[in-house]
Amino acid sequence: MTPILSIEGLSKHYGAVVALDGVTFSVNPGEIFGFMGHNGAGKTTALRVLLGLTPPTSGRVTVMGLDPTQDPLGVRSQLGFLPASYALPREMTARSFLCYVGAMFSMPRAEAEARAEALITELGLSSFADRRLGGLSTGMAQKVGFAQALVNRPKLLLLDEPTSGLDPLGRHDLLESLRQLAETQGTTTMFSSHILSDVQTLCRRVAILHKGRLVAFGEAEALKAEHGVADMDALYLALARRERR
Amino acid sequence: MSPAASAVTAAVSNAVTNPALWWMELGRRLGERKSKGLAALYLGALLAAPKLLEKPPPHLLAAAQSWFGGDDPFALFMYVWTDLAMNKLAVVTGIALGAGVLVEERADRSLVLSLSKPITPAGLYALRTGSAVAVAAGLYLITQLAGLGLFAAQIDGFRPGAFWLSGMVHVWAPIFATTLSALCAVAIGRQLGAALVSVLVLFSLVGGAFLGVYNPAWAGALAFNPFTQAVAGVTHLGDQSFATLAPPVVGLLVLNLVLVAVGARLARRVEP
């Protein structure tokens, strides 16, 4: 199977700070892939490189057959991205913002409006679709953030800490939406999180970063068996302790 | 080329050329609080200008007569309107709308969402600066249009044609202030720094806009000042013609295009 996303020997340095150090893994089409690590492990940096927002110091990255350093717009036109830390334009409504995002993907106005309406219905945004984004709760804003990542019907979703700040119901809804997207549309998701229970619920394969280095990659169940642990929390702790030695 | 590759190429090349995006961007700009605040300032200028002329200080009257020749009350009004009201508003407009282009969005963490879409930093800069310029020019021209109706009844010797023509040249003052502030934003990288530098540069230029009128011996040397060019409609009140007004408009158009191009180039280094 040809990976939809592959990273080979990826390093990224900011001066003397090594954010990523020779990271190698790949993601298969249609899977929900767990990308784990503590805060500052390098997950967000890796996602930025995948989007072509920042160039790697060394290594090779391929996203849907394209090199983000050479063709960043080609990559971004086919994927959806939800950053860990972002703000929505305060004065816009959810509906007008989703239309605006549609226009950024070159949709004519009518198509952008239809796509926004479809997302509002599918993701249950109707009750606040015409309220200013500046007045939305964290959970509502996160739903709009998730919706904007889906405007272009992406083949690949890059989600950075998507469940942070969500209540249990919101978390459940988002994880369920990702499952449905994978099952019904074959959407691939790279699910970056430090909430290990979410990764355990959703992902069959994972990559784990620790201080910029890849410390594990493969089937979650196999990794747990290999380290003699029962869940992802214990797996992560075991790997982190091993690295500390 | 495969259909998928064609679709990608189309999305890439059309993102900033999509008219729907420009219309939505304009709507977004108009919805911002600072656009509404600026509209209130322009309305205030419309209402205040005739009041300023009710009892002009004698020294100002004498100075205006000496600068513009004769005792035409319309000339004095045009000086007050253009220099005391609209020149200052042009600077405020430019800084409010331009000094935050990209850097304000980076600071409030909304830039990362925009740049994760198929649009380059340079394209986004052109889009945001373009909408800022459209709002700046729109506010100016709507105010000028409203002034046509309002001032005709309030100002002695009001000449609607000359008023409108001078506005068509002076509208380039807020446009220039906006493009310069936007350039400062991406050159300096911080909104506050860009605003401070813009204030310094723009108010210095505004202060010198009429120096060539006050002292004709300096007129040639001060012609580089974009605000001097933008008040050509007032300084040529007696001989407004295509020959006198077209050169400053063309010069200002070229200058603004250059500023946007340089800003777009600098914007390429902006990371969210």
Image (tube, coloured by chain):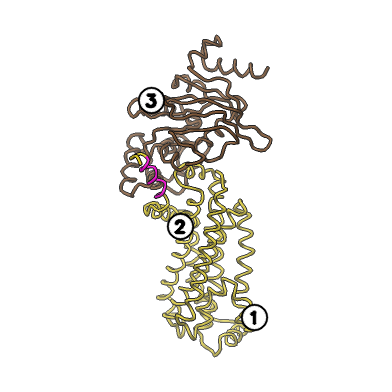
The type of residue carrying mark 2 is: Ser
Whether callout 1 and callout 2 share a subunit is answered yes
- Asked if A151 appears above or below B132 in the picture, the reply is above
> Which residue carries the number 3 mark?
A179
Whether callout 1 and callout 3 share a subunit is answered no
Q: Residue furthest bottom?
A: B70
Q: Check if residue B9 falls in the magenta segment.
A: yes
Tell me the chain of label 1.
Answer: B
> Which residue carries the number 1 mark?
B218
Q: Which chain is brown?
A: A
Magenta: main secondary structure: helix
Question: Element under label 1?
Answer: helix
- Asked if A103 appears above or below A237 in the picture, the reply is below
Question: Element under label 2?
Answer: helix
Indicate left or right for B174 with B1 as reference: right
Residue depicted at 53% across the width and 61% down the height: B179
